[in-house]
Amino acid sequence: MPLLTVTNLKTYFHTRSGIVKAVDGVNFNIERGETLGIVGESGSGKSVTCYSMMGLIAQPPGKIESGTAIFDGIDLLNCSPAQARSIRGKRISMIFQDPMTSLNPYLKIVEQLIEPLLIHEKISKTDALKRGIEMLEAVGIHDAKNRINQYPHEFSGGMRQRVMIAMALITKPELLIADEPTTALDVTVQAQILELISKMKKELNMAVIFITHDLAVVSGLCDRVQVMYAGRIVETAPTRSIFYTPRHPYTKGLQKSIPANQPKGKDLYTIKGLPPDVSKPLPSCAFASRCEFATERCLVEPMPLSVDNEGHSHTCLRVHLNEI
Amino acid sequence: MAETILELQNVKTHFPIQKGFVFKRLVGSVKAVDGVSLTLNKGEVLGLVGESGCGKSTLARTILQLLPTTEGRVLLNGKVLTNASSKAIKEARREMQMIFQDPYASLNPRRTVFETLAEPLKVHGVCKTEQIPERVASLLQTVGLSPRFIHKYPHEFSGGQRQRIAIARALALEPKLIIADEPVSALDVSIQAQILNLLAQLTRQMGLSLVFIAHDLSVVKHISDRIAVMYLGKVVELGSATEVIESPKHPYTKALVSAIPQPNPDSEKNRQRIMLLGDPPSPINPPKGCAFHTRCNYATEACSASVPELTSFEGRFVSCSRIREI
């Protein structure tokens, strides 16, 4: 049984300018110990998907219209607040994008770091402190004994992200959600943080959902990748298949627009147009207006979900019909 | 022989750190840019890369005279800009313009596109008032936006479109040199490619010189003719874009290049990463000798004693005293 199964998740925001369908019918699951990458451009709904599961969507304006997220037998979307609290921060943790703003500048690292332990476990403060220091050492912060009593501003960006990771992992969660954890960091620091996440993942045998817009980051880290566009998942596949045999025209376009893949001196491949406005009604295939293969049928016919025996699924009508 | 448009001679930009409220005393300085010498030819694209805090943006602002230079000289078309009169600097700004990183912050939200684009034309008196609408419309077309957007406000545009407006603003005075400070890092992959193509096309068509700052090495490699790698306020390697990225020579460049994740699972698996330990040292107290020796895998005692100069090596410039041995 998968660790987490999300079925037909729909999260809409009711705003003055209309209903924004940020997540519009998302289905996926993740096994224990697996790393799943969620890739998409800004506004594609990758963060909102995870925020919805964690109960972090402000309601109103947001509303989870439908869907279930079964985590080890408990539906995160329809359980009691007490049940949700016992899972959130204990069995599922999250790392956010910007380490500069996700730590409280008024509190010493120690208070923020051991707070989840004090809340979720019957543990004395001295033991919690000991675990906190061990955890800081595990994420590669030297002189943890002294540094734990410092304030966030005394740490650099990469170090703060390490503190965030330590904080997320201190309760030994079964699922870690990392929302663009390296986007705000330099490449050299990014490499350190990615290494750290995969090391900790092996040690704790935890599942990781890794949200990013950077396909290159996904390639070394994830077992499986799903690509989101306009609130829907357009393609899911094992990492190798996504890179070597992408099926959906959007995935292909994304890959082709990475500068590293293209000959120097020539114009870069671009996906024409702009991402769609998800507050307007979308055609059956949300990518149709930017797709070079789109036909009339793409706008009206329901997109089939085709899955092959390797677990590679996509929602492109024309690929499904073997037309492209 | 290509004509030089911009020349930097041992440029240093230090920020003083003062202590005390009434009797301020100097306790040190942040050596953001610490002795950079570069030349840029007409029509050339120079990429500037390095980690955050290495002085890329400070250098850009120093070139534009938005920051005072502590030492050294900046020459534009052979004219010295450092310590020039404000009148002379205003003149020079017609020749050089800047594009900023964040198109959400660099456009005034209370001004329409027309007001934003007309301002440089008015300030510099480039054309008659009645010609301004025409000029603005043609600028918008140059950057691939429809002139019907002319009376809209920035919030009505997406990130990519805003960056196009920022590019149009930089082009308004028909400059010879544009400095682009991370112009695509706030944008999505598919939009990033559109903006890069636009910049490449404009430099070709208008014969512009471009200083392109970014931390994404594959982007820089794609657009630049030459690349300068900076570390703690100094240039450590300078050479043709393809060579620097494909066969880096300086240990820092090697580590930087090896840290880029590859969009390809097989080469990603085989990628040899050179892990750099820790964070870059503080530019307040840069390490003695070679600034990189504290994190360098090849460092010897000698490296902490003398500062290596940027010297010619196999068709490029590298500042490493052990370059011939490693």
Image (cartoon, coloured by chain):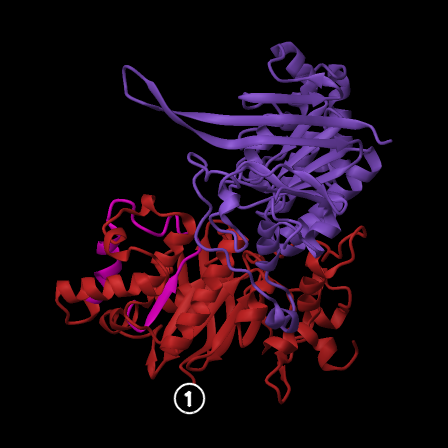
Is the residue A80 above or below the residue B28 in the image?
below
Question: Residue A290 placed where, x, y %?
Answer: 71, 60
Asked if the magenta segment contains residue A231, the reply would be: no
Chain assigned purple:
B
Q: Is A86 or B5 nearer to us in this picture?
A: B5
Residue under numbered circle 1:
A1
Is the residue A79 above or below the residue A167 in the image?
below
Q: Answer left or right for A71 relative to B10.
A: left
Q: Answer left or right for A113 relative to B215.
A: left
Question: Residue B203 placed where, x, y %?
Answer: 78, 38
Q: Is A66 or A135 nearer to us in this picture?
A: A135
- Magenta stretch: give its range: A89-117
Question: Residue B257 placed where, x, y %?
Answer: 62, 55
Q: Secondary structure at mark 1?
A: loop
Is the residue B287 above or below the residue A47 in the image?
above
Viewport quadrant of the C terminus of chain A: bottom right
Q: Amino acid at mark 1?
A: Met
